[in-house]
Image (cartoon, rainbow, N blue to C red):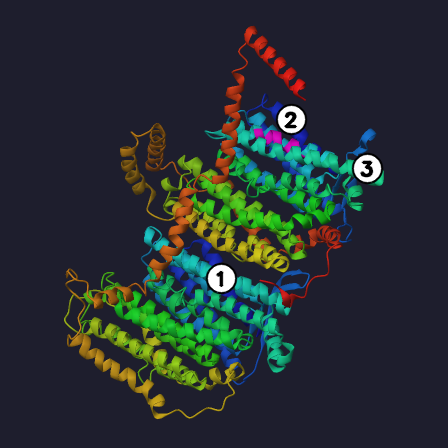
Amino acid sequence: MEILLSLIPLLPLLSACLLLFWQPKIATTQVIGVGSVSLAALLALSLNIALWDQTQFVLQTSLGQWLTIDKLSLNFTLYLDPLSLVMITIITCIGALIHLYSACYMKEDADICRFFVYLNLFVSAMLFLVLADNLILLYLGWEGVGLCSYLLIGFWYREVKNSQAANKAFIITRIGDTAMLIGIILIFYQFDTLNIQQIQAHSQQLLQNSELLTKGGAGIISLCCLLLFAGAAGKSAQVPLHSWLPDAMAGPTPVSALIHAATMVTAGIYLVARNMELFSLAPDVLHFIAIVGVITLILGATSALAQTDLKRILAYSTISQLGYMFLALGAGSASAAVFHLMTHAFFKALLFLSAGALIYCMHHEKDIFKMGGLRKSQPLLALSFGIGCAALASLPMTSGFFSKELILEQTLLAQQPLLWWGGVIGAFFTALYSAKLFFVIFFGKLNRPSTHNTPRAMAAVLIALMLLSLIGGIQPQGVFAHFTALEQSQIPAPSLSALEHWLPIILPVLTVILAWFLFIKGVFTPDSQPSQSSVSIKQQLERFLHSGWAFDSLYHLILIKPFRLISKYNHRDIIDQLYRQLERLSSLLYRQLSRFQTGQLRHYSTSLVIFCILAIAWGLTL
Amino acid sequence: MMLFTLVILPLIGGFLACWSQRVHQDAPKWIAAICTLVTLAFLISIKLTNNIENLELWLVDEPRAWIPRLNITAHLAMDGLSFVLLLLTLLMGLVGLSSAWSEINQHKGFFYGNYLWTLAGIIGVFLAMDLLLFFVFWEVMLVPMYFLIAIWGNENRRYAALKFFLFTQAGGLLMLLSIIALTVIHYQQTGILSFDYQVLVQSPIQSELAKWICLGFIIAFIVKLPAFPFHTWLPDAHTQAPTPASIILAAVLLKTGGYGLLRFVLPLFPESAQFWAPLMMTLAGVSIIYGAIMAFSQTDLKRLVAYSSVSHMGFVLLGCFSFNFYALQGAVMQMLAHGLSTSALFMLVGLIQHRFHTRDLNHLGGLWHTLPKLSAMGLFFGVASLGMPGMGNFIAELLVLLGAFKQAPIFAIVASSGLILAAVYSLRMIQKSFFGMNLNLETSFSDKKSSDNSSKNDLDNSSAGLRAKRLNDAHTHHITDLSVKEGLTLMLMCLGLIIMGLHPQPIFTLVNSSLMEILSLIQSPLQPESPLLEVQL
């Protein structure tokens, strides 16, 4: 079984190397690229089956030694427990489906080989991330997925806009990553180890005998958690490091589905869930995480409402759903977060892939207001969008419903009514924009007919994801029971009031009905005359929301502009100018002094006489 | 005699190369290649014949009287630290030869002669145990390098070569004064007149002057490193130097500064080094950030890479003055990894310049379409230099930060912001040169634009001419992707970086005992370490 485990991340890596050096024909590329990930998925599923009955299991396998210096000892050890098993199952299965989809989606691209190299490399790095047993190996995977994300966002490199988006994504996440690296160093000095399990065990000891923890120690641990969370916030697009994700939609759509919805952006959730014992030593930080989560989920949901670009709507929606997961983590319920992570991976991948198919059918049209009435011509896509949006809006009996309910319930159990209200308001906006998305595209009048049909392979993937989105929420005991270890709250569950119980269930349904009247019956239409003389508050608000609460302009003002200014004015290196002045001074002296050397005897004798007089005068005055 | 052979081989090879031009035009480069290979083989055979598993400090030790009157000896010795740096020197020497192979066409004999003499000087610097001998080698590597830049350089080569020479020579003068002062004071205190490192290390001098003597050494070395504010010779030297000289300069010559700090400053002046440590860490922090910001604002690719060197070598300085084991290991690793990644970047810039006759980022772009292999390599080394885990640079920076954090958390945090800035300038470089629009389309566009401006001054005129030439090249498909030799060289360097990133242990083991020795010398006066929980932020 250990060998199977080590094969799971190595297979995609191997195929990436193979494709890189071999550069085979398109068909072979597709087979190798898709095959390796599918094989990894099969292996992950077989591990699932083998470990189904066990509730507490740990599987470890070492791929070799990395380095040992003094107390610092790092190995390439893979560590499998229920949490990482769930993660690798999601990554490989969704990954395999999306690989299959992209084999079809990208088949006309000349660079398909490069595409699959990046994509396979990504899957491998992501698997290393979730299987790592020490923080530095985790960081290796962490940066690896960041790199692949960068490469894939800028995949169509001829457009300068794409590579700028890629740079933005990399640099913003890098800011978080650097904070995280400092956090890791701090943890190393605090615990004398970087092994994640040892850190957790140590934290648990500290939690049980709280007298071991000095005041300063508690402060340092809070700082560690905060820094780790900064890394998580960067990767998972939380406020204030969220603004890269909407721009990251410049990449090919399967990439958005795999990296920027289902897997990579959830790495932050995984990081916090993995270190839950450490985080539970710092309740203040957990509270902070919950607050950031709520702010993010409201920001994402309201901004999604104001977008017109199909993929940007989905991007903001991803930000908002990630906010829910952090809310759950902040409430101390890692299992709810991971559960939502799983269902979100299903339905968001479904939505992105359907969007990709739709954009493909509509000749690369991304503006939802230029679509409309498509339910007749694209019944499959209508169905898949319907299911995806329903799950996103968490209509009852979809997968998103169960997980979001659980998060809201856990928030109440953690006695955070204010955050609960934030979550409910977010749920309202979520339902509103999902309904808007669905109604605007598939109802109303037909704006532009679609020509293509969805290719068969794509359709198969969509159907598989539809099923997962529908039934994925029925809690399989195998997934859920394992997480009891991660639960923090031992508070006896206070009974929920009727309002608290029913509001989250009723609200999405009501909102969808509201949306029907708003968007289809024409109570609310997008402003078709932007040339109105006075800018109304509504327009300003819309612009504010459209820009994602104007974070980009803020960063431009306080970071990018000063930086550019410095580099512009200091282009020639001020220090070098100092040395240049030295050079100028010496050449000036040279020119002045060389004037004395005229070659004429009378000048020399005059100066000699003057010197003598001065010397004698000086001698006399002494 | 073994170690002397290491120095003498390239010296003789240099003369041979000079002379052989009379026999055949291509003879010098073959002689240079064979000579470097033989030296390399010799180095490895020394390593293999001397059992390194026993943790003896010096692998080989060869004293010989030179000027007995002043007790100056020709004393060479090699330990793990010198060995890895020598290995780097010779391997990068080969890489430099590979890039010189078709690029250098004038005065071949003299070029390869100077090239080998520089190598000989560097090898001597890494081996010398007598301070005066060290100084001699320090000068020996300097003068041929001056010629390499001044004769085979680009348009502004005289200025750059002179600047390079003056900066290092000023540092060298300070070092000479310090060496003499050190010996004299040592003589007064112990009655032993000796320039020998191993004698001087035994009894660190107790004097008020020690601080200033130490500073003299430090300045000589950080000019070479180079650290802020002595860095300004580097961008000019790199921009004007021919590519092979750039490679040697970046890969090895800068490392002599780091080596000097590790080998001489820390052990000879344990107390004074601690006195200067806060200043040096500040300079390191400033170098890291200032270098990165300057790299961002450059449009010339070579200048960009040169400033990024300043930023990276800041980590070496930080590591040296953090006085702990992680940081020292990190500093050595950084020297090696930076040697590989930066010289590869210089080589790539050289290849680009060779093909397009420009290094200006504003005139490049979309290279991926025309030259996918070269661009992929550029991407790899760009990413390596921004510190991607899995490559040597990351291990190095991690260890330096880890070590520096223990000593002075503030500096570690400041330095880590260099990681963010490294991403900023590396990605800008990658984007501007490899991504973007197709070259041909863009060229015609920018030509049209520049033809309007070209009347303004002559400089623009000439660059427009260059661009027109490039356009022709692009149209007639003269531009070819990496040749097998170039590709192979770069692939090997990739492999080296990845091995350093994933399996760095052999290198750590090699330098382990040398660094232990240095650390034991410096830590003896150090007070016991403070408990970790009281880390002040």
Contact flag, marks 2 and 1 (Cβ < 8 Å):
no
Identify which residue, A67 or B321, lies in the foreground: B321
Q: Are marks 3 and 1 in contact (CB under 8 Å)?
A: no
Is the residue under label 3 in contact with that under label 2 (CB below 8 Å)?
no
- Tag on residue A177? 1
Same chain, marks 2 and 1?
A: no
Secondary structure under tag 2 reads helix
Instruction: Tell me which numbered mark, 2 or 3, is placed earlier along the sequence.
Output: 2
Residue A140: % across, % down: 53, 62
Q: Are marks 3 and 1 on the same chain?
A: no
Which residue is under mark 2? B16
Tell me how far mark 3 sits from mark 1, CA to CA.
53 Å
Q: Residue A198, image x and y in percent?
A: 62, 73
Label 3: state its secondary structure: helix
Identify which amino acid the numbered label 3 is placed on: Tyr
- Tell which subunit mark 1 falls on: A
Q: Which residue does the numbered mark 3 point to in the structure image?
A: B187
What span is in magenta?
B138-146
User: In front: mark 2 or mark 1?
Assistant: 1
Locate the N terminus of chain B and report the quarter of the image it occupies.
top right
Disc 2/disc 3 C-alpha distance (Å): 42 Å
Mark 2 burial class by Cα count in 10 Å: few <14, some 14-19, many 20+: some
Per the image, label 1 sits on a secondary structure element best described as helix
Left or right: where does residue A1 sit relative to residue A572? right
- Three-letter amino acid code at disc 1? Asp
Chain at tag 3: B
Q: A564 and A340: which one is in front?
A: A564
Q: Chain of mark 2?
A: B
Place residue A420 in its image quadrant. Answer: bottom left
Are there few (<14), some (14-19), or many (20+) residues within 10 Å of tag 3? Answer: some
Residue drawn at x 44%, y 37% is B353
